[in-house]
Every structure is written in structure tokens, then in C-alpha cells.
Image (tube, rainbow, N blue to C red):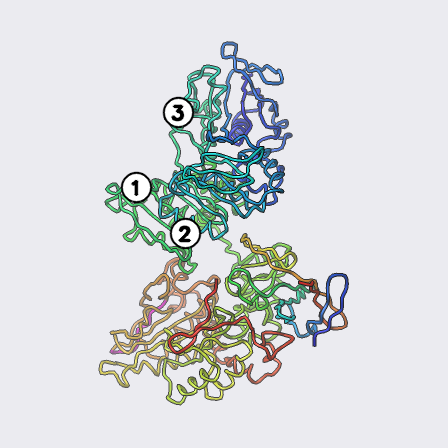
Amino acid sequence: MMKIVIIGNGMVGFKFCEKLVAKAPKDSFEITVFGEEIRPAYDRVHLSEFFSGKTADDLTLAPADWYAANDIQLYLGDPVKEIDREQKKVYSIRGLSVSYDILVLATGSSAFVPPIPGVEKNGVFIYRTIEDLEMMRDWAKKTKKGAVIGGGLLGLEAAKAMIDLGITDTHVIEFAPRLMPRQIDEAGSVILKNKLESLGLKILTNTNTTAIQGEDSIKSMLFADQSSIDVDMLVISAGIKPRDELAKQAGLETGSRGGIVVNEQMQTNDKSIFAIGECALYKGMIYGLVAPGYEMAEVVADHLVGGQKTFHGFDMSTKLKLIGVDVASFGDPFVAAGDGRTVVLEDTMKGIYKRINISTDGKYLLGGILIGDADAYNMLLQTAKNKVILPPNPEDMILGARGGESSGGDSVSALPDDAIICSCESVTKENICKSVTENNCESVDEIKKCTKAGTGCGGCVPMVKDLMLHTMAANGKYVRNVICEHFHYSRQELFDLVKINQLKSYDEVLDTFGKNDGCEICKPVVSSILASLWNELILDKGNAAAQDSNDRFLANIQKGGTYSVVPRIPGGEITPDKLIVIGQVAKEYHLYTKITGGQRIDLFGAHLSDLPAIWKKLIEAGFESGHAYGKALRTVKSCVGSTWCRFGLHDSVSFAIQIEERYRGLRAPHKIKSGVSGCIRECAEARSKDFGIIATEKGWNLYVCGNGGSKPQHALLFATDLDSETCIRYIDRFLMFYIKTADPLMRTAPWLNKMEGGITYLQNVIINDSLGIVAELEREMQLLVDSYKCEWKEVVDNPELQKKFSHFVNAPEEKDPSVKFEAMREQKKVADWK
Amino acid sequence: MITTETEGKLSWFIACKTEDVPVNGGVCVKYEDRQIALFHFARRGAWYATQNECPHRNQMALSRGMIGSLDTEPKVACPFHKKTFSLETGECLNGDDYQIKTYPVKVMNGLVYIGVDGE
């Protein structure tokens, strides 16, 4: 049996054991591990969580009995002191001697401690092992002022540890002119610095510590510019130094600045000895991250079972959360002018900095930096790594989430099969897709078990999920896009179930089809389904508390906690008398007024307890609820049309009013907007709406599934030259089909984009009745149209309902005293929030 | 109508009648200068009280939020940005470093009492 000795039981040493026993048949190797620490390997990446509540056991990668179960002889607290290459034997401190055929050095690194006078004083720590952390924890009890030397990745991790230890008065001292000099640029460093300072850290860059002062214990630190700060605890976390002393002593080749020289098989200059992880020096470089260490472990394990894998350097892209701030850096973050172009997005208010570097020809992404918001990291990293050709406007990639309408599925499908999705465990796109197609994984957890993807830093999990959904769909597997942990149904399934079972309240639905107590995701979904099915007053049947807050109070909550009021103004047509009433109400209740984008008037700054009185006045004047607070039909915008316009073909205003009144109060998976234009000049911008109507010589053209907002999309031509009646019939069917089949919070545009067969399929369903459902759709819509009532009128007529509109339950006449307004342009605005 | 009775360090005051609070919903209670969100978690037969202010943007709004559960943890979601907080511990459940204050609640003879400390 081949004898394998591993020196070092850190993360990489453990990973090597794990990979080797997974690859090799039982009894093919006799494995011995020597570890210097007293604990089996633990997760050093998440070390700082030791202070936020995790125990040493939580951080342990595998307990001691795992090694026993896999026939691995593990010696802890017993470092190797000598390697005898002649005899192929190692000798431990405690006097053991073990022979090897293959020796693997996974000795890792130690903290680099700069030679500053006074580093030996009490209260000066390094940040490397659980023992270091235990000593820090004991010392921290008597500490008020802390400091960390090192503003890089590890230094900032240590600063986080100081905050977790309760030492909020902490300085971070960095020798370089900026934070994280290896990963981010000057501008990014400024944003990061501001963010960290807002959390209470004090950051000193360009600062060289010349002495650590105090008697036995640290009292202060002196800097090169003769300034000093008082400190009673210092953590040095300024970099790492490979542990190569054993290798040196054994005469193995090492680098001038440390590290055991290895070739692409991770072999040292002694063919029987390998080095992996942070102690290995490959082509002049030490890889101080866990992912390349794992890759090296893979190469050696593979080699020992006869494989041909080799190591060719490793992408050092990284994404992490530093003290609550996302920081990511990928590819070449710094590209010099001349080698590429740079797009930068900087928001000093929100503390967001994004930079992408693009090849001079604009085709490829070379690298970049993300601070404050690193959601796009995975996609950008994959785009850079796989040399995916960039879209014409690459800046779109860093403009951030757009209305939550993710198109992730499409973008992952563009990646090549060998794209590494999980870099911690080097799992490719192909591996993940195969786990779905061949091993029938149908959840991220199953994929994690099967491929190990997502088990390291977890950053790739959203992408793994996208890939899973995409692959399942591509295989014709039924993708269950379930609502939340309380309902294991898609919205469409639940819609049908609620209908068939004639359920009328949220609690009934939860008791029948859900579990536990519901949440802020399923409550509005179910409430919307109930409203779309039965059109009963949404505040009835105990459903009020299951409405999203805006629906619960029939108004839009605004900054400061006051509400805005939007009366319906169908088609944007309003009489002078009604305008006057709006003015009077606004004056009486001190409301800010603004014309909306949908041709109506929004009144802001209403106290909760004033809403019923405001609406009483509006309803007396003939207004109705505008449903601006609901996922419902908003407005039907119109141009002035043939009644006044010299180009107008038909009376667009009358048709808009007819349509708006038909669908007013209609609740849907998301808001619905419409527009009617009197001619092809399209002044009502109908093609940016969920359904838009444009007059032709012969009638109306109907367009569907347009969108303005964050992801504009023109509505597509659906049917031409319709008479008014047919046009409305098609809209009835179209809206009802959307309401029954869309996912929660999905506008019509992404609904169509996701629909297999697209607009042609939709036309077949709605116009040609390919599913045989149009009669039912029309019937269902007619029920909703016939049962419409103005919600606000019902409240105004019902004193019991009005009671719910007060801020204090025990002082209903009092308004929220925390609401503050400021004057602005002869009106008011709400005081800014922090 | 604020009645208080002292018990240990807590003083209990009458917040409202049980029927004043929507089933599985919340209301805001005024106590001196404080605003307290009171929730009737009827599905569990439980009552909870927390500070009314959401610490994310310092908005007096938690009482208007939807309640529910995360696994078994009862929670409330702020109506502004849907930050969620445990009704038991006050801990923010979205991974942000926020913590809200919770208050004990008891119900006797149709009245809801909230226990406040001397702060």
C-alpha cells in the first residue's frame, strides 16, 4: 500500500484528504496527517464569525471521527520537525517517525509581522488561528481603543473582528496610499473608506508605524510623521508569509521571498514531495486564497490516482462582504490606459462604486471593481473569464437591478460549458447541468450535495439556481416556481386551487394549501388572487391585515409615513369644478400636489387619520379611488383625439375613458397601464403600456406587453383595424389570461418574454382560441367588471372601517408626531430620511 | 386612559381592547413619548409588542407591516423596504445589523397590557 504523509491540517490539507479518499478505492493508500494546531482543520475564511457567535465546532470542516472513519491517521498538536529525504521519513516533535512514499506539504502560512520595535508587547496580536482569537477575546475585555495594522483583505477582516469584540473605537492603519491596494483602485478605496468610517472605524492610509510604545503592554503607536495614537490593543494583519522552513531545512528549492517552488503538478524538486496551498510558490506567485489551494489539492490527488491534471495559475477574482460592505474585484481590475477602456459608475450618496474595464475594441470585459453593490459579480466574472462578446452598451451590466425583472436565465445560458461557476470547488457549468439532467437534482441543496457547487463562499448560488431552472426548463421538466416557504405552488397553480375550492380569505387559503403563518411575500400574492377572482372589498373577511401595507390603507405610503392620494381621472379628462375641489382639499389638508405621469393629480403628505375625511370630500365631488396603491389598473392615458386635434382619426379620449372605467379596480399580478392614441403620431405613448391602442383609418390597432420603467420595451402589434367592441373583447381575454398565468410581480412585458411561442402563441390563445378558454376568460372578466365598487366609497360609508385609519390605537385623534415637513417652492416636502 | 401597575421592574399599562387590534395584524400604541407596535398573532394565539420605528430608515411604520413567520420564527416586515424582524427577539432577519426593542404583552379580561421598563 502506498504511504502518503501530509504535513499540515488546514483547509487545503483537509481538502486534499477529502479529495483523495473520494477518488481512491479503499485500502489503496495509507494516509497519515500531522497538524500543528490542536484542532482538526477548520474554516479560516469565516474566522471572524467566531466573534459573532460561531463556536470552534461550528467552524470545524470535519470532526476527528471523519478521519478515523476514512482510515486516516491524524496526529494533532504534533508538528513535523524534520524531513529525511534519503530515508523518506518524517520526524515529529513528539518523537514519532513515519515513512512515506509520497509527502505532501500543506504547511500554509503564518502572519507577516513587520519588524516594528515593540511588536512583542502584551496586547499585540496576530489574526490567524482560533488560539489567536481566544487570546484576543480575553484581552479585549479590558480594551477601549483598538488598532489594526493592515488595510488589505485580512486587515479589514481583523477590523470586523474588533467591532464584533465591542471595540468600536478602532483605527485601521495602512502603509499604502489606499485600502485593499491589490484589489481596488484609488476611487474605490475612497468609497470604501467613507463606508467604513460611517460605521465608526478610523482609517489612516499612507501611514507607516515606527514604534509600538508602552511598558509591558501597548499604550500607543508612533508613526513616521511623528504623530501618534493611544491604543491598548493592536492586531497585525498585514499579509502572509509562507511556512517553508521545513522545506528549506530539507534542502527543497524555495523562493527568495519565501514559498516552496513547485511545477505544474505541484511537485517540488524532490519528485516524491508535493506542496499545496499558501506554502507553494508557482511561477513566482503565492496564492493566498482558498479556491486556488483547493485546485492544487485536486491536481495532486488526481495525479496520485493516475490522472493528468495540472495547475496553471488561478484567477484571483474575489467577492466578499467586509463589515457589511460588498467588495469585489475580478480579472484585471486596474487596466492601464491604452490597454483598454474604463466605464465607472460612482454614487457617493449610496456608497457605490463600480468600474469595468473593456478591451479597446469594446468586445471583451477585462476586469473590474465593485464596491457597495456586488450583485453583478458572478455574471461579470463569467463574462470576463469566458470572453463572452459584450453587448453594444456594456455599461448596462453595472447599472444594477432593474425592477426585479431578472433575465438571469438567458444570460447563464450564453456561457460555455466549461465556464467555472463555483470557483471555490471548481465546478463547471457542465457539471451543474449534468447534475440536473443525469442525477435529477431539482433543488439547489441537491446540487450542492451532488457537485459541491455553492458549498464554499456561496457567492455562486444565485447562478446555480438560474442554471438549474434553465436546464430543467430546457429538458421539458416542470419548473416549480414556488411562491415562498409557505406555499409550495406557483402563482398559477394557487390561482386555480383557490378558484376551484371557492376560498375567500387569506387564512382559509393558508389553512388549506399553505403551512405555518405566511409572510410578506405570500400575503400580497394570495390577496391579489382573491381580489382577481371575487372582487370583494379587500378590507373584508379579515383580509385587511393580509394586504400589502398600501392596499391595507388604500393609499401609497411615502417617506416619513404619510400617504399620497390619487383620485381617478379617467383618460386624463377633468372638469374645472373637479380641479377646484382637488385644490380645495389639498389646501385644507396641506397636501403637496403634483401632476403624475399618468395624467392625474397626486396629493402627498396626508396623515393616515385624515385619509377618510379627504376621500369623503373627493367622493362627494364625484371622484373615485384611482387604485394608485394597488397592483391594479392604473391609468389609461389619452391624447386629445379627433374632438379637437386636426390630425385625430378617432375620439381617443372617449375610448380611453370607456376602457379605464371598464377595468378600474381590476387587480392583477402587477400594475397595469394603458394608453389610447388618436393617430399614428402616438401622443399618448400607448406602445409603452401593458396594452395600447392606436387609431387607424379603419379602426383601432391593439398593441400588447409594452413597458416603460426600468426596462423599456415597445408593445407588440397584436391585432389590426379592430372595431371598438372586438378591441375590448380581446383586451378582456388578454388581461384575464395574464392575471391567471403570470408570476407574482411580473409585468406583462416579461410575462410575454418568458412565454414559449411568444406573441404568436398569445395571438393563437386570445384570437384563435387555441386553448378553448376565451369564453371562460370573457365570463370571468365580465364578473369583475360587474362587481366593481369604489373601495374608498365603501370606507367613507362605513364608520367601523374608518376606525382603522388612525396612527395611535389608544389616541386616535393624535397624528404621528415624528412626521416632519420642510418648505420647498411654495409647497412642502417631507424631511429627508437618514 | 393610561393605567399603570408596577410589577418587578416592569410597569404594565393598558394599551387597548383586544378587538381594537386586527386579527393577524398590528396597531401603534402611544405610551408617553414612545410609539409601540402591538401585534395580535392570532394564528398562534400570541401577542407581541416591539418598537414602532423601523431602524433601517427610522420610520414609524412597523405597526403597519405584515406579520408572518420565517421557519418557526414569528416576524414583521416593514412596509417601506420589507426589512423583517423577529417578534420574539427583535433581531433583523435579513442579515442586517439592526435590532429592535421588544416588550412583553399580556391579555386579561379583554384588555391588552404592555410591560415597559423605566427607560
Counting residues from the start of the chain, the first of labels 1 and 3 encountered is 3
Q: Residue at x 56, y 78 (%)?
A: A609
Q: Residues within 10 Å of mark 2 (few under 14, many from 20)?
A: some
Q: Which region shows up in magenta?
A: A697-704
Viewer-nearest residue: A96 or A626: A96
Residue A495 visible, this orientation = no
Most extreme residue toward the bottom is: A577
Q: Main secondary structure of the magenta part?
A: strand
Q: Are marks 2 and 3 on the same chain?
A: yes
Q: Which residue is found at the position 58% from the left and 76% from the top?
A: A806
Give the answer, above or below, for where A547 lies relative to A462: below
Sort mark 1 into few (<14), some (14-19) or many (20+) by Cα contacts within 10 Å: some
Mark 1 or mark 2: which comes first in sequence?
1
Residue beneath disc 2: A408
Relative placement, left or right, of B45 versus A644 is right
- Both on one chain, marks 1 and 3? yes
Q: Give how far across and how far down residue A553 sits, in percent.
A: 54, 74
Q: Label 2 amino acid? A: Gly
Horizontal and vertical percent for residue A124? 54, 35
Q: Secondary structure at mark 3?
A: loop
What residue is shown with label 1? A335
Relative to A401, A157 lies left or right: right
| Residue at the disc numbered 3 | A264
